[in-house]
Amino acid sequence: MFEPGRDLVETTLDEPVRETIMRDLREVGAKLKLVILPRVSQEGVLDRLKEWDLWGPLAVCLALSIVLSVSAPEAQRALVFAAVFVVVWVGAAIVTLNAQLLGGRISFFQSVCILGYSIFPLNVGALLCLVLHPVTKSLLLRALVVGVCFAWSTRVSVVFFGEIIEAKRRALAIYPVFGFYSFIAWMILIQK
């Protein structure tokens, strides 16, 4: 028999749009904080990332696409934007599929979420290269900036993937992650 007030589930269908957007932005910020400050001991992080979202990775991907397309020649801007967008999403899907085939204990969208957020340090590197390029055209300085950001992104992903893949298969899961971020880092390094 139904009793008023009993067995009711709280939903967000009635909350104002502004509140929904602010809640989502706080979640994106909290997940970016996990990427900015990765720890070796990630207790509770995977539990938090089980609540995956694709808003943050989409924003990170769009920001990287915009930064790289701004620095491209005028005739190639749309192509660069599309290429970066496709490389990020298809690359993340391939790395995720590899992790799942190796027995990873994570869902497809959780893995794509982690990989997408982990591109953020490379965004910082692309933005720094864009800002520093007119001042100094030093390829060595750009390589240093991109190298540090590449190591940062790879480290973040390795910490997360290290927890979901058993030790004997970990190298097979990490290698595609390394290749994925290497390709993105190379795209940043060759920008004009």
Image: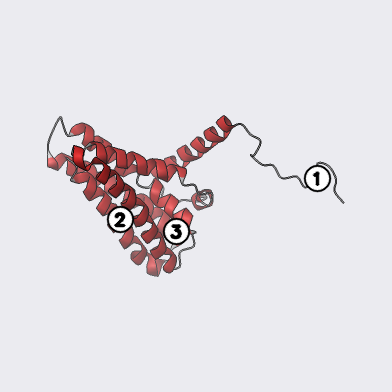
Residue at coordinates 20% horizontally, 45% vertically from top-left?
189
**Which label is found at residue 6?**
1
Coordinates of residue 85 in the picture (x, y in percent): 33, 48
Compared to 110, does 129 lie above or below?
A: above
Q: Is residue 37 visible?
A: no
The residues bearing labels 2 and 3 have C-alpha atoms spaced at a distance of 19 Å
SS type, badge 3 = helix
Question: Mark 2 = which residue?
Answer: 180
Please state which amino acid type lies under the numbered disc 1.
Arg
Please state which amino acid type lies under the numbered disc 3.
Glu
- Crowdedness near tag 2: few (<14), some (14–19) or many (≥20) residues, C-alpha within 10 Å: many
Marks counted in the figure total 3
Give the quarter of the figure containing the C terminus.
top left
SS type, badge 1 = loop
The residues bearing labels 3 and 1 have C-alpha atoms spaced at a distance of 39 Å
**Which label is found at residue 69?**
none
Tell which tag, 3 or 1, sits nearer the viewer: 1
User: Taking 116 as reference, is 138 left or right?
Assistant: left
User: Taking 191 as reference, is 151 left or right?
Assistant: right
Q: Earlier in the sequence, mark 2 or mark 3?
A: 3
Write down the quadrant of residue 59 in the picture: top left
Coordinates of residue 52 in the picture (x, y in percent): 50, 49
Q: Earlier in the sequence, mark 3 or mark 1?
A: 1
User: Taking 157 as reference, is 48 left or right?
Assistant: right
The residues bearing labels 1 and 2 have C-alpha atoms spaced at a distance of 50 Å
Coordinates of residue 43 in the picture (x, y in percent): 50, 51
Q: Nearer the viewer, residue 15 or 172?
A: 15
